Amino acid sequence: MEKNIISVRPMDIRDFADGKHRITDDRPYGGGAGMVMKPEPLAGAVRQAREQMPGCRTILLSPQGRPFKQSVAGELSLLDGLIFICGRYEGVDERIYPYIDDEISIGDYVLTGGEPAAMIIIDAVTRLLPGALGSDESADKDSFSDHLLEHAHFTRPQVFEGESVPDVLLSGNHGVIENWRRESSLMRTLLKRPDLLEKAELSEKDREILKRWCEHIGRVISD
Ligand code: 4H6
């Protein structure tokens, strides 16, 4: 926001609620515990936000949404504006769906409200926008889109609590360093997120490296 790459304008849906008490929630039809967000204040807020921001997408953050991924961040980064509906209580009245273009979940867990989910999406999308990252960072922004985890990183001191920086990284030989980093990525992905390897584009050499590590750790994987 300070770099004018994005602006965020929180809205108070109470401004769009009627009646003396301007309530935004009510008891669920059919009974049960908890409250439901009334549709009219949400609809009013979305209508006003759309007037201010043509060509935007209205997104409901909810546990029922499509999973948020780096690819979704990339997709949203191409749009001219985003409206986030952050539900509270037990959720929103079903009849708000005609106002919703997209429904996203940041993961399989329950939050009190959609606001932290919106913050996470705003962060992931903003770092993809021109000027968000320093020139020395920008190259790694698609590091997740190859479906591998990042390689290990080291900085000074050269020895910390008896652990040394791998010699290759001090060699100055960029070819050797790139090979080491690729192997580090493959090994970390195999150990920490083997599920990601399904989608990764692997060369014959990559497969050889993974096979060696599989044997080393006594794991069997297909292909
Ligand atoms: C809409 C509908 C997003 C919003 C229901 C929101 C998790 C995520 C919410 C709810 C969210 C996610 C209200 C349902 C509280 C559960 C707000 N929770 N909930 N994973 N909560 O992206 O009860």
Image (cartoon, grey):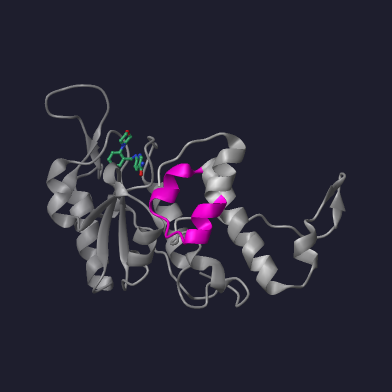
Q: x, y (%) of residue 50?
A: 23, 67
Can residue 63 be seen? Answer: yes
- Residue 66 placement, left or right of 18: right
Q: Determine whether 90 is above or below 17 in the image.
A: above
Give the residue drawn at x 69%, y 66%.
177
Give the residue drawn at x 24%, y 38%.
25
Main secondary structure found in the magenta portion: helix
Q: Quadrant of ligand 1?
A: top left
Q: Is residue 8 magenta?
A: no
Q: Determine whether 115 is above or below 78 in the image.
A: above
Can residue 2 be seen? Answer: no
Give the residue drawn at x 25%, y 64%.
57
Q: In which image quadrant can residue 173 be found?
A: bottom right
Q: x, y (%) of residue 209?
A: 56, 53
Q: Give the range drawn in magenta.
A: 193-209
Which residue sits furthest top? 32
Q: Does the magenta stretch include residue 206?
A: yes
Give the residue drawn at x 46%, y 66%.
126
Q: In which image quadrant can residue 179 be found?
A: bottom right
- Residue 216 placement, left or right of 201: right
Q: Between 120 and 94, which is closer to the camera in this rendering?
A: 120
Q: In which image quadrant can residue 153 be found?
A: bottom right
Q: Determine whether 68 is above or below 168 in the image.
A: above
